[in-house]
């Protein structure tokens, strides 16, 4: 395995579980690609946590419908991150702008 591939693997293993889940459906061969996507996922997770903390302070309980709405919103955000990565015609996996290997 080349150095770049090992670097990608080591980075991916060290990721926080929430960030790793956000990247789990993607295949990366370049360190810069996985780093940039991980930073985007982390930013969205932090924004979501801050918004949820603010909302929790305003209302002590909240309805079940509003909790479901929050989950849907977070899922939509995560899907927007990976929406720009297309399936490869050759191997049927997702690639982050790199050729199939």
Image (cartoon, rainbow, N blue to C red):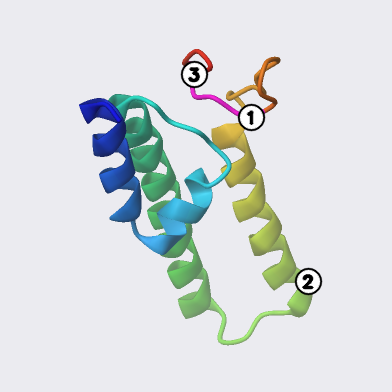
Q: Nearer the viewer, mark 2 or mark 1?
A: 1
Q: Is residue 47 above or below residue 7?
A: below
Q: Residue 18's x, y, as percent?
A: 45, 60
Quarter of the image where one finds residue 46: bottom left
Judged from this view, the residue extending furthest toward the bottom is: 60
Q: Residue 9's x, y, as percent?
A: 33, 42
Quarter of the image where one finds residue 59: bottom right
Q: Is mark 1 on a helix, strand or loop?
A: loop
Real-space CA distance between mark 2 and mark 1, rounded to the nearest whole angstrom: 35 Å
Real-space CA distance between mark 3 and mark 2, rounded to the nearest whole angstrom: 45 Å
> Would residue 96 be counted in the magenta stretch?
yes
Mark 3 lies on residue: 101
| Magenta highlight: main SS | loop
Q: Which of marks 3 and 2 is nearer the N terminus?
A: 2
Q: Is mark 3 on a helix, strand or loop?
A: loop
Q: Is mark 2 on a helix, strand or loop?
A: helix
Q: Residue 74's x, y, as percent?
A: 60, 54
Judged from this view, the residue extending furthest toward the right is: 65
Residue 45 is left or right of residue 71, and the answer is: left
Which residue corresponds to the image point at 63% horizontal and 40% vertical from the top-left? Answer: 79
Residue 82 is left or right of residue 69, and the answer is: left
The circle drawn on residue 65 is: 2
Circle 2 residues within 10 Å: few <14, some 14–19, many ≥20: few
Span shown in magenta? 93-97
Q: Which of marks 3 and 1 is nearer the N terminus?
A: 1
Dot 3 and dot 1 residues touching (CB under 8 Å): no
Mark 1 lies on residue: 93
């Amino acid at each position: 395995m080349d150095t770049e591939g090992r670097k990608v693997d080591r980075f991916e293993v060290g990721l926080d579980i929430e960030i790793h889940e956000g990247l789990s459906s993607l295949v990366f061969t370049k360190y810069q690609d996985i780093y940039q996507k991980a930073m985007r996922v982390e930013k969205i997770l932090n924004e979501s946590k801050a918004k949820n903390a603010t909302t929790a302070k305003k209302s002590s309980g909240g309805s079940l419908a509003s909790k479901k709405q929050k989950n849907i919103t977070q899922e939509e955000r995560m899907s927007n991150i990976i929406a720009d990565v297309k399936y490869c015609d050759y191997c049927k996996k997702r690639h982050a702008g790199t050729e199939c290997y």
